Image (cartoon, rainbow, N blue to C red):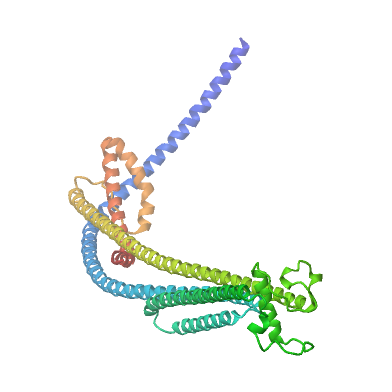
Amino acid sequence: MEALKQAISTLTLVNKRKEMEFKKDRRLLVEAKDELLKRSNDMEQQLKLLKQQNKTQHLKQLRANLTESKEAYEKAMTEHGMVLAELQQQYSKEKKHTELLEKQITEMSQRLASKDELIKRVEVRLKLMGHLEQEMETLRKKAELTPTVRVIKDELINVKSSCDKELSVFRTRNAINETQLREKDAERSGIELEAKVAESDQLRAKKAVEKDTTLKTEEEEASAMDRFRALYHELLKQQPDLDPIAALFPVASSPDPRRPLSSNSEVHFNILDYLGNSSSTPVPPFCSESPSPPHAATNEENLCGFCLTSRKELDHFKSLIGHLQHKLGTLEENHERTKKQHDNAADVLRQRIIELENSQQRSFVQLTAEARQKVTELEDELAKQRARIAEVIAEKDREIELTKNGLAAHHAFSNAHFCPVEAVPNLPMDPRPNDSSTSATPSLSGRTNSECRVRGPNCGRSRNAGISKRRDTGQSIGEMDDRRPSLLSIRPLLVVRATL
């Protein structure tokens, strides 16, 4: 029980303390309420005065802002049209200038391509010259002892002189007009190649004629020797005791047997040896040293010294003739090989000329296609920029219409809500100076809270709606005034994009 009593006493003390604190707080709240009511009454009186003063001034300012915005818009549109006209003129001039530059670029590219082709041709000719010089050296080493080396030397000298002439012609052609030189070079190269081919054909024909003549002479000599052999055998049959040397060569038959044989006798002996070797009938002996005839001797020991020397000379002449025939065959083979190489070089040059012409045509087609593609890309870019400018202009027109509608709504709202001052005494106004607005905000908030309790819930809604509308209209006007320099700064860029 004592514990309960103590608890009840403590609870009563706590309740008394809470009641004292509540009364104190209530007294403070009542005093604050009285102060707020006084402030609200003062602010109502100030608002009435400010409303009467600022109503006409605010409307005049709004109308002046509207007229200024309309004038600025008209000026901007006129400036925009003038800038557009100037930029279009500049665009036409720049377009003509770019076309001229493109023509010059195409001409210079064609000239460079032709010069590159000429340089490549000269390099090919120089390579061929080096190859020909190597071949000349090899042929000179091979055919030093042959009689036809002179002809080959003359041909090589002619080829070298013609190549030097061609090189000099190519060097002089670089200074002449390239467009005419390409056709002339092609024609001259074709004519020169044809001339070289004709020369090689003529040389081959000459060599064939010479070969035919040599063959004919050899055949004639062989036929003459056969006839001579037949006549000789007939004479031997008719007169077996006939001395062949005295009958054929009476000068060689000297009465002095000790007189040595001359060179003519050696030749006669060779002829008789040829007759004896080529026939089956025996030839009468004319040498006193050997009892047997020279053609019937199977061993060299049975022959005399003169017969051996003549036989050696005959073998030497036969080997020399075979060597010369072999040389002639090698020369003919080399001639055929050089002719084939010349034909191959001519075919390679023709193919190279065709490839260069095709590559030039392909490069020309590629350059024209690239130029057309660039033109189409520029036209597409211009169309896109024009569409963007049209969109930007439409957007700015929409913004201007929105500002006009906002100003009209604000004007209607001001006419509807600010004229009956006595009916709505507590309607807030936007004071122009910043100090009064900042100082009046707490009193207005207190006043609205106190009056909304008396007038009902619609009071706060109408007040907040009016304040928000006026703030929106003020912001729209400020944004329009702030956007004027930005629009004027953006306009030249838009015009440049439109003209491009």
* Viewer-side residue, 88 vs 332: 332
Residue furthest top in the image: 1
- Residue 328 lies, in percent from the top left, at 60, 73
Residue at (43, 77) in percent of width and height: 195
Quarter placement of the N terminus:
top right
Q: Which residue is found at the position 47% from the left and 30% from the top?
A: 22
Q: Is residue 390 left or right of residue 283?
A: left
Vertical comparison of 346 with 389: above or below = below
434 displayed left or right of 63: right
- Observer-nearest residue: 301 or 417? 301
Q: Is residue 323 visible?
A: no
Does residue 294 appear to the left or right of 46 in the view shown? Answer: right
Kindly indicate the quadrant of the structure image that contains residue 294: bottom right
Total number of numbered discs in the rendering? 0
Question: Which residue does the image show at 30% across and 72% down from the upper left?
Answer: 95
Please tell me which residue lies in front, 394 or 210.
Answer: 210
User: Would you place residue 348 above or below residue 167 in this image?
Assistant: above
Judge left or right: residue 85 versus residue 192.
Answer: left
**Looking at this view, is 274 or 439 the one in front?**
274
Q: Position of residue 353 (x, y in %)?
A: 43, 69
Counting from the top left corner in percent of width and height, residue 182 is at 40, 76
Residue at 59% from the left image edge and 17% from the top image edge: 7
Whole-percent x and y of residue 26? Answer: 43, 34
Q: Pick out the residue farthest to the right.
A: 301
Quarter of the rendering occupied by the C terminus: bottom left
Can residue 338 be seen in this snapshot?
Answer: yes
* Relative height, residue 401 to residue 368 (above, below): above
